[in-house]
Image (spheres, grey):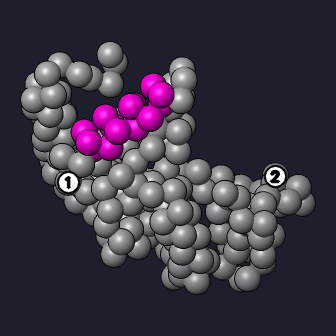
């Protein structure tokens, strides 16, 4: 889903993020590309987890990148760029709430087409029982490997809230698994 205008050119690849940010703020399109391109997969996966639809997620990811480009001059650099981008993506996705997810879109592969279809249905049903915040926290921790403090900073919530949402998400998934006659994603 890489946007042609965000592909990383070799001329600025060696600059630090701070230098890229400085150049991007002054309107250097190569620096903007180099700064945002590495974050595009994360933004897409987050949008997909929230919206559940590949087409909507692609639109939201592009909207996120465009909003970030527009807001770059205002970015103070106090937070990590990735946490700032996650906050923008989450705000954009909140406007479009849907609850569907595809394992293939999330980067998870399964054996055959029948199994893949069944796994998608099971995952979609499981994630439908979570709130948007629970899905977001779970994605950022389980898939992206973010720490609780990074998630909290990115979502502008206290760390304890993130811990609670992760706990509730896992508990809801365990309850869901019990009510589905033991059919789990591992079966």
The span from disc 1 to disc 2 (Cα, nearest Å) is: 40 Å
Image coords of residue 132 (percent x, y): 26, 57
| Residue 58 occupies quadrant | bottom right
From this viewpoint, is residue 16 visible? Answer: yes
- Answer with left or right where residue 12 lies relative to residue 98: right
Q: Name the residue carrying label 2.
A: 14
Q: Which of marks 1 and 2 is in front?
A: 1
Q: How crowded is mark 2: few (under 14 residues within 10 Å), some or many (20 or more)?
A: few
- Answer with left or right where residue 70 lies relative to residue 100: right
Image coords of residue 13 (percent x, y): 81, 54
| Vertical arrangement, residue 68 with respect to residue 110, above or below | below
Q: In which quarter of the image is the C terminus?
A: top left
| Vertical arrangement, residue 169 with respect to residue 156, above or below | above
Q: Label 1's element?
A: loop
Q: Name the residue carrying label 1.
A: 131
Residue bounds of the magenta highlight? 114-127
């Amino acid at each position: 889903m890489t946007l042609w205008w965000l592909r990383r050119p070799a001329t600025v690849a060696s600059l630090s993020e701070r230098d890229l940010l400085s150049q991007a703020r002054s309107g250097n399109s190569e620096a903007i590309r180099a700064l945002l391109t590495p974050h595009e997969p994360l933004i897409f996966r987050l949008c997909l987890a929230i919206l559940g639809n590949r087409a909507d997620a692609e639109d939201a990811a592009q909207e996120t990148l465009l909003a970030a480009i527009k807001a770059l001059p205002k970015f103070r650099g106090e937070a990590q760029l990735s946490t700032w981008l996650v906050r923008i993506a989450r705000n954009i996705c909140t406007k479009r709430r849907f609850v569907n997810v595809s394992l293939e879109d999330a980067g998870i592969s399964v054996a055959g087409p029948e199994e893949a279809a069944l796994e998608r249905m099971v995952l979609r049903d499981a994630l439908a029982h979570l709130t948007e915040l629970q899905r977001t926290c779970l994605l950022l921790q389980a898939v992206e490997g973010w720490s609780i403090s990074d998630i909290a900073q990115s979502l502008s919530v206290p760390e304890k809230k993130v811990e609670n949402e992760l706990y509730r998400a896992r508990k809801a998934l365990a309850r869901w698994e019990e009510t589905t006659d033991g059919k789990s994603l591992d079966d």
